[in-house]
Amino acid sequence: MEAPKDKRTKAYKEWLKAHEEDNSVGLGDTIEKVTKATGIKKAVDYIFDKAGKDCGCEKRKEKLNSIRFVSKPVRCFTEEQYNQWTEFRKSKNGNVKQGVVTKDWQRKVMIPIYAQLFAIQHKPKGCCIENLILDIDKVYEQYQ
């Protein structure tokens, strides 16, 4: 069924409610769907209802839904970026611990490479570039 076009209508709200159940927010929703499909949820509800206790499923589901697994999409280097990163690794600048990555180089080269590879915009920061370099290196090493 197609979603009603006017979001202010009752039909749209009913459609949304029906389809929200189909969409998992996170791991908790996925586990709930599996336990419903296998009958485990029904058995647990029966046992805990008979005992007059709460199984804690909703709290557990909310906690599991709050966990976010971030996986970055990975694109390919352009030829120019690959060459720039190769030079970076060969140079003294490849040693992050010495802190020789200039802000200018970070802004002009590293951030655009990172944004291209992982399809996100990243704001340059003076600190914490080690993780960016490690992420880019992981992609670079796939080329080797």
Image: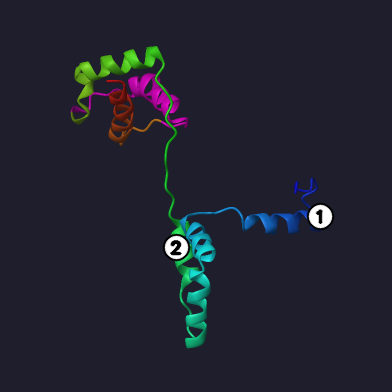
Residue at 42 percent of width and 30 percent of height: 74
Per the image, the residue denoted by label 2 is 63
Q: Measured from the top left, where is residue 71 in percent x and y?
A: 42, 40
Q: Secondary structure at mark 1?
A: loop
Per the image, the residue denoted by label 1 is 9
Question: Within the image, what quadrant is residue 106 found in?
Answer: top left
Q: Which residues are magenta?
A: 98-123
Q: Secondary structure at mark 2?
A: helix
Above or below — where is 43 with respect to 4?
below
Which secondary structure type mostly characterizes the magenta part of the structure? helix
Residue at 51 percent of width and 77 percent of height: 45
Q: Nearer the viewer, residue 102 or 48?
A: 48
What separation in Å lies between label 1 and label 2 (alpha carbons)? 32 Å
Going from N to C along the chain, the mark reached first, 1 or 2, is 1
Q: Nearer the viewer, residue 32 or 39?
A: 39
Q: Measured from the top left, where is residue 64 in percent x and y?
A: 44, 60
